[in-house]
Amino acid sequence: MTKTFLGFPTTFRGNASGVSYAPPGVGQLRGDERFPRAARTALANGQLRRNLGAATATIRAKRAAVVSELPDWEQLRDAGAAIKADVMARLPELLTQLETNVIAHGGQVHWARDAAEANRIVVDLVRATGATEVVKVKSMVTQEIGLNEALEAAGIAPTETDLAELIVQLGHDRPSHILVPAIHRNRAEIRDIFAREMSDAPADLTDDPRHLAMTARAHLRRKFLAATVGVSGANFAIAETGTLAVVESEGNGRMCLTLPQTLITVMGIEKVLPTWRDLEVFLQLLPRSSTGERMNPYTSMWTGVTPGDGPQHFHLVLLDNGRTAALSDDVGRAALHCIRCSACLNVCPIYERTGGVAYGSVYPGPIGAILSPQLTGMGGHHDPNASLPFASTLCGACYEVCPVKIDIPSILVHLRNRAVDQSRGRPGGQLMAMKFVGWVMRSPRRFALAERLTRVGRLLAVRGRIRALPWPGSAWTISRDLPAPPAKTFREWWLEERGHNSHDSHDGSDR
Amino acid sequence: MRIGLFVTCLGDAMFPGVNRATVTVLERLGHTVVFPADQTCCGQMHLNTGYAREALPLVRHHVETFEAALQTCDAIVAPSGSCVASVRHQHASAARDVGATALAGRAEAVGARTYELSELLVDVLGLTDVGAYYPHRVTYHPTCHSLRLLHVNDQPLRLLRAVRGLDLVELPAAESCCGFGGTFAIKNPDVSTAMLADKMSHVLSTGAEVCAASDSSCLMHIGGGLSRLRAGVRAVHLAEILAETGVATGPMGGALTP
């Protein structure tokens, strides 16, 4: 067992010194393109937009209905936020307690500094069993670290057993949603993927949902019965008891958690909860926010190893991969409160139109826009993840639904400041422009002069509207007209009409 | 009541008609309106785009200007939900972030007495009927910052329902953002346009002649799209509707489509 020092929270000081981010080149926390460009590609896919529009509308309505049933929903959210804030404040202590209790119940605990280390640990553990195949429970964290790729490179074949993850895996595709990774696929596309990639698919496969489900079930049953190693993530881990918990809908996760001889669970360090009692809060918050169900169909919990029942070897891999970097930012750390319900994705007007792949990371949508850049760091203007905090209109819909009240809009703004500050000192048109506008705006005299100058824009207008502007204004006029600046500003009108009634104003010089 | 008018930089430079309409409504109701002439910009664009350092002098200037105005005024009003939200919810924390605690306290005091127009009319003055006449079919888009930062709910709708002659039709998916988002509209023009396209199709589905809202910025976006399409639907600020009485030469202008 290796043990890695996780570090203690310190306040972020504006640079990456002493902060260790998720390393590049392994896993999936960063795409190849900045968001505006990746989004353009996604927006051109009409099928994707129809699928997403329909799916998110359905799940939004379901969530809203079941949340409105609970008179104490707001208190539950407060409790969830408070428990998570407490966890982040004493993470090292709780993780040590968790480790002690997992070991006491016959499990083994491994500490992984980053994705590469976690993959190496899991590969070595699987190799030690002699297995060449593993079955996997749907998990975000193993997507984050690129575990499937690492296993395949080591000659081990992973099988995703969550139906939607299986569709993504067989389609050589990328997940586009935390909960519903194949949300961008419709049943005709799924039928084609099964027929092409699933060796035991029937020749007469149709796109009837029941037929598709039965085919996947038969395929997966054979995998479950043959597998000797299961790999999972974790929704929660209880420090005081050493218990791990996975919640799911299909029951395929439970197959993986109970049938194999060896179970390997990879868990982000932020998932720990102090006490068993805390589950009372989260098992109410999560299913209602996530699938819009009052209760999820399957909740599996296990504590170490139970002789003669279930896996006889249990390994817990605790993963940092940039989490302590996020923890060291006293505003941004609330992103670690996330319980991966995906309610924020479903209400996000940006996500609804672009889907998840445009975000580049396995964590898409509003939560991804604040989590991914904190895990990886933002390496300057050309880093795709430095564009994510700007992938929002700050409409606030995400904050409204977050079950643990993560103030996503405020953290987006906080990270925008960090992104801007990181590129200060480098000549940049936007910085110059913002500085200039700021200088103009802090003097009423200069502002009034600037207003008069914008009147030049009237020359560009035809019948009161401007249809084309040079760059960067062209980004506006690609799809929107701009009204011609008025002949008279309000200020001028007021001085002419009501000059005598004007509020006493001193000289509008610099201050 | 003596009311200070916070015209917002965009409202001053581009949509003076919206501010003139605000003056018309308040004066018709018997209030005195003053215009603190030193005002410039609340700094929202800088704050929301990550330029807190550049925003701070603007925050300080806004607080000083309206603190002075509040010595003779009972309240400050702006015909913009997002600018009021910035003043009420961002100014103090922006000051606190750089350790300017005294400024933060003063910003809180100014923010507490700054109202969005429909808040002032309905919540503070207790009115819904302001004596307006506007014989048109209107749909209303609740702007995000009014809705989610100021928690302005049905105040604008109550005001519109009390307007004589006005046929108010419900906007489908009303609470979905129009895609403006300040610099977002420029930084992510494709996504912004996709959101706008859906907003416009909802507006058009109502058969309304007018799409109303309480923020000139969002209206500039929705109206700019409708104008580009020659959709024949005008984007009009709530204040402009409330100013119309059908008798006098009410202040027109500000509407984006002719």
Image (cartoon, rainbow, N blue to C red):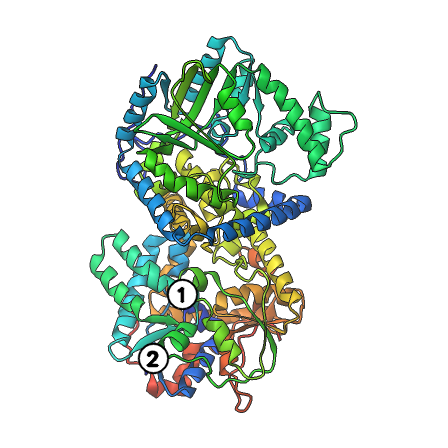
Check disc 1 and give the amino acid type.
Cys
Q: Which residue is more in the foreground, A85 or B250?
A: A85
Residue bearing the label numbered 1: B83
Q: CA distance from mark 1 to mark 2?
A: 17 Å
Q: Quadrant of residue A309 in the image?
A: top left
Residue occupying the far right of the picture: A204
Could you tell me which quadrant the C terminus of chain B lies in?
bottom right
Q: Is residue A389 left or right of residue B233?
A: left
Is residue A9 in sight in this rendering? yes
- Judged from the image, the secondary structure of the residue bearing numbered disc 1 is helix
Residue A202: x and y in percent read 75, 25
Residue A177, horizontal then vertical, whole percent = 55, 39
Q: Residues within 10 Å of mark 1 (few under 14, many from 20)?
A: many
Residue on which the image places disc 2: B3
Tell me what residue is drawn at x 48 percent, y 72 percent: B156
Front residue of A261/B153: it is A261
